[in-house]
Image: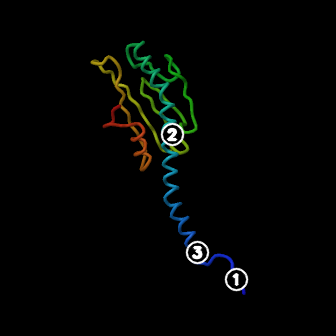
Amino acid sequence: MHYQQGFTLIELMVVIAIIAILSAVGIPAYQSYIQKAALTDMLQAMTPYKMATELCAIEQGALTGCNLGTAGIPASKSTHYVSGVTVTNGVITLTGQAALNGLSVTMTPVPDAQAGGLVWQRRCAATGELQTLCEEVFRFEAGNA
């Protein structure tokens, strides 16, 4: 007797179809995961500038002069996902790169006379899916922190 060995064409096509379906679902989910991780990196990169700006405003009594590299505010530092940071009169802007290309996050401090501190207004400028993810990670509520 002669036995055939191997897979039929139909069996191979079914396997390829299953792989295609898994790829169609898995790749976008992975890209979304990478962007969320990158946004977390951006959030962590923003923290020292935010704290230093708050201290500068307390020490000087105003936000004027709270600029990058002065009054205790660190110089610009880039990360894998943040190409640059600017601080001008307390307004902090971070620009994304790599997985965050096209994203800009701006935090504007507004003095709160009742609480005696600063309230941060945040703005996320991006397009498409990145805008939605940015708003989720930074927990934007009507543009305010």
Going 32% across and 36% down the picture, which residue do you hit?
Answer: 141
The residue tagged 3 is: 11
Q: Nearer the viewer, residue 37 or 80?
A: 37
- 73 is higher (above) or lower (below) than 33: above
Q: Are marks 2 and 3 in contact (CB under 8 Å)?
A: no
Q: Which label sits on residue 3?
A: 1
What is the three-letter code of the residue carrying label 1?
Answer: Tyr
Q: Which of 113 and 38 is in front in this view?
A: 38
- The label nearer to you, 1 versus 3, is 1
Quadrant position of residue 119: top left
What percent of the width, then of the height, locates residue 125? 41, 41
Q: What crowding class fits label 2: few (fewer than 14 Cα within 10 Å), some (14-19), or many (20 or more)?
A: many
Q: In which quarter of the image is the N terminus?
A: bottom right
Is there a contact, CB below 8 Å, between mark 1 and mark 3?
no
| Nearer-N-terminus badge (1/3) | 1
Reply above or below: 71 against 81. above
Label drawn at residue 96 = 2
Q: What residue type is labelled 2?
A: Gly
Q: At label 3, which amino acid type do we have?
A: Glu
Dot 2 lies on which element? strand
Dot 3: within a 10 Å radius of its alpha carbon, few (fewer than 14), some, or many (20 or more) residues? Answer: few
Residue name at image x 38 percent, y 13 percent: 61
Q: Position of residue 26 (x, y in %)?
A: 51, 56
Q: How far apart are marks 2 and 3 (CA)?
A: 46 Å
Q: Indicate the position of residue 118 as horizontal and vertical percent values.
A: 35, 22
**Colour approach in the figure:** rainbow
